[in-house]
Amino acid sequence: MKLTTLMKTAAIATMIAIPGAALAQWAPSGPITLQIGFGAGGSTDTLGRAIAAAVEENTGWDVVVENKPGGGGVAMLSTLVNAEADGSKIGMGVTVATIMNLAMRGDKLPFKIDSFDHLATVVLAPVSIIARADAPYDTFAEFVAFSKENGGSLMGFDGGPQRLIMQSINNTTGSQVELVSNQSGAEIIKGLLGGQLDAGFSAGEHIQYLESGDLKMLGVATQSRHPYSPDTETLVEQGYPYSVEPYFYLAAPAGLDPEAKDALATAIDEAIKSDALDELIENVMQTKASNLGPEGTEAKLNSGLADAFALIEAAK
Amino acid sequence: MDFATIIAGLTDALTPLNLLFVLAGVFVGQFVGAMPGIGPVMAMAIAIPFTFALNPLPAIGFLVGVNKGGLIGGAIPAILLNTPGTPDAAATAIDGYPLTKQGKPLKAMKMALYASVTGDTFSDIVLITVAAPLAILALQLGPVEIFALMVFAFSLISGLIGDSISRGAIATALGLLAATVGLDPEHSTPRFLFGMFQLYDGFPIASVAIGSLAVSEITLRVARMRGKMRPAVVIPKNQTKDQKSVSFAEYWACRFVLLRGSLIGTFIGAVPGMGSTAAAFMSYASTKQTAKDPSSFGKGDLRGIAATESANSSVAGADFIPLLTLGLPGSASAAIMIGAFLIQGIQPGPLLFEQQGQLVYGIFGAMIMANACNLLCGLFGLRLWSKLITAPESVVFSIALVLCVTGVYLATGGAFGVFVMILFAVIGVIMTVLRYPLVVFIIAFFLGPRFELSLGQTATILRGDVWNLANHPVAVVLFAMSIFSIYWLGIKKRRRKASD
């Protein structure tokens, strides 16, 4: 008993000591403000507040969380871009939301991807295509064929790229899937269970319904399969060359001192890897954290923007 | 679900520690909710970080307390100052504020408290006993039915408030117009932005509600201040018991009003997407419509307060039905509640009752206890508010204005929201002076986005063909009821005008 306690203490001491040593170079001069691009209570907010708490615990810095909702993160990014690049202000949003805004009305926005120094991604939302368990199709390809045979079907979506993907598939296959706009994944699930929708997109809310046997997965909309359902093929594997990869990510205004950027990225990485975040991500998304790091985040945004332009063309 | 789990859960709720957190939550909710400009939803948002360190049951119990306390608190500024912070409280102000002007604020607040606790307890009992079957029933109501239900709500509300149908219709149209600002729900096309990216999600709800309902009233009252300092509310000395409290006979006379309010609220709460505002006004409208003496409404009728408060409070309990069974929030405070569940490591949804049965029944127990705390806390608190409100007008309204600005700044995350609040305060003053029903404007604004989304969904689901409505009998009935209700209200109004 005593030995375990001792070992735990030692382990915690090391955990505190390592980031402490790495961060000795740079520390913020005052409190850091973390602006969340979405409203209080949503998944971005929940994750952001947990990261702030973990950073505070690991480093002893003060992190103040503010909600700056509006336009899928545009309101937050538009303020962040004008903030001083001294590491005192960082923002959190969702990659796909930022990308879609840049792709559709980039000329009207006061920022570009390189207006920011990107720090980290937190987690990839496990976007999937789902249907009720008793539906007469088991894969996305079968659903497309079903829709074509029956002169159309109804599919719920809650984000711009999902609509574009389905419209592109309609264009190439003639599947005539009609898209019904919804405000959240939970609402799409309500439509499926109530029989008002034939299929729909979901970013993790569906997983417990797979366990309860009410829903089934037709396909995976991200680039690789999901661990909780290893047999469900991606859209690409089923012959449709599209994917959507919404990462929650953090950024600061461009022009950070490299030392400050490094310190911030390290502190955030430590927070993302903490047990508290691990448990929370498991609860909210039923998946694991994935931090692509500063370069990886920026590369993801750039490639995502190129894909988005192609998708807009294909959906026309 | 076995009986032992239910009992174990309910017993958990009765431990002194949990009771203490529920009571603390109710106290915070009533107090913060009563601040003009801050209100019940902000009370929840402020309370949530305090729950991070707690265990699940005390944490959720505390928030349940804040939520329920806020429902009572929200009615207080509406009754005392005519400065509601939310549209549902605006319905309470219609009959509550006239009572205050008659020197009977305590009576009005007590009626609100009793009605609120009644409605809340009713919907909690429904939640505890028949949540699962009710959730299945609610699932059957799809976008088409919800759209029809909203049309019905509009038809009830727009004809009933104010003295002219055309002014009511104009106010509705203006409210819907204000609701179209921002990205459209179907294709995300920006509308009426004038280069302001802050408007992507539309005018912030807190700015519009507090600006047009509270700040405009404060402005008008300040404009009327003349000469020496007067108390904000004059309560005559030596009041009889009848003027200070609600007798059981008066409460019992409202039993059908309360029952109808609770039923409407519970039903609307179980269907996600309508919200307590629609419930409060539907209950008020149907009470006024069926009364033998509709002209007494708006002049301090206890039935008006009973109708709105029982309906909007019963939404709070019923909101938990889609929340617990589907993880679907039906209101802003339910959305905050889901965040709290997730932080505690609890995933609302189909497996919740199986995996966390004891906790769920613990929460149910906490809800019932919160209702009892609400009654107790309210009876003490209301006296305090009625004392505070006799302070000089200049003091009360300046404090209220500061609180409104602070509340909006916090809720919208910056000064932009405060500017929008000022804009809507000006619009509110103009509409009040020109005798356009402000309340109708605000309901239309509140329901507008959901109305537009449901319209788009309905058009897609019906594939643009009205005849496909034949597959949705419930919607057809609701549309027929809307036409009937407009016709009926029109005839009644015309007759009343003719007889005057």
Image (cartoon, helix red, strand yellow):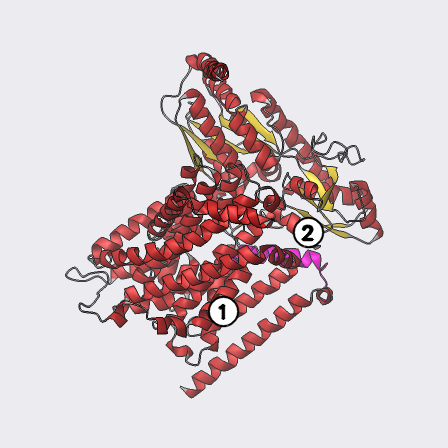
The residue drawn where x is 51% and y is 37% is: B343
* Residue B75 appearing in the image: yes
The residue that label 2 is drawn on is A193
Q: Is residue A209 left or right of residue B214?
A: right
Please, what is the three-letter code of the amino acid marked with disc 2? Leu
What's the magenta region? B444-467
Q: Is residue B99 left or right of residue A213?
A: left
The residue drawn where x is 80% and y is 35% is: A238
Extreme-left residue of the structure: B228
Extreme-front residue of the structure: B4
Residue B286 position, x and y percent, is 49, 72
**Magenta span has B83?**
no
**SS of the residue at dot 1?**
helix
Residue A291 position, x and y percent, is 58, 24
Q: How many residues crowd around disc 2 within 10 Å: few (fewer than 14), some, or many (20 or more)?
A: many
Q: Chain of mark 1?
A: B
Extreme-bottom residue of the structure: B499
Q: Compared to B25, does A293 lie above or below?
A: above
Q: Compared to A293, does B210 lie above or below?
A: below
Please give the label number shown on residue B260. Answer: 1
Q: In terms of secondary structure, what is the magenta stretch mainly?
A: helix
Q: Is residue A149 left or right of residue B104?
A: right
